[in-house]
Amino acid sequence: QMAVRVTFIWGDYTRKSGIATNDIVVKFDGLTQDMTIPQLHAHLNLNRNYGDAIPLTVRRKGKDHELVLSLPKERPKGE
């Protein structure tokens, strides 16, 4: 089962989703199997596009919260 601890928040789009440090991601884009951070990034790169909305579930203080991570509309400059 997936259990990825959020240790830092990167980008305004992540903050706007409601994700907080120390949240535990237990469901990501419909996936619940155990994954590493690089595997989650690979899933996004292979299956999603800029501007997509990614449903996720985080466990915070013992309660599950349904959130939506809206990816940036375009690639950040300099990447």
Image (cartoon, helix red, strand yellow):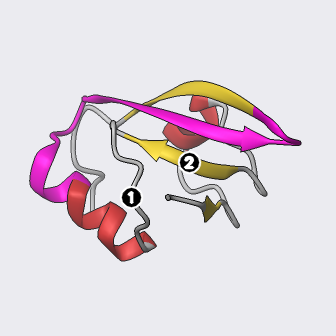
Camera-side residue of 38 and 78: 38
Camera-side residue of 77 and 74: 74
Residue 66, image x, y percentages: 58, 24
Is residue 75 found left or right of 25 in the rendered image? Answer: left
Part of the protein shown in magenta: 44-63
Is residue 56 found left or right of 31 in the rendered image? Answer: right
- Does residue 28 show up? yes
Residue 59, compared with residue 51, is above or below; it is below
Density class for disc 1 (Cα within 10 Å; few <14, some 14-19, many ≥20) is: few
Q: Looking at numbered disc 1 in the image, what kind of residue is underneath it?
A: Gln
Residue 58, compared with residue 39, is above or below; it is above
Residue reaching furthest front? 1
Q: Which mark is residue 33?
A: 1
What secondary structure is found at the residue carrying circle 1?
loop
- Name the residue tied to disc 2: 26
Cα distance, mark 1 to mark 2? 9 Å
Q: Residue at x 80, y 41 (%)?
A: 60
Q: Residue at x 41, y 49 (%)?
A: 32
Q: Looking at numbered disc 2 in the image, what kind of residue is underneath it?
A: Val
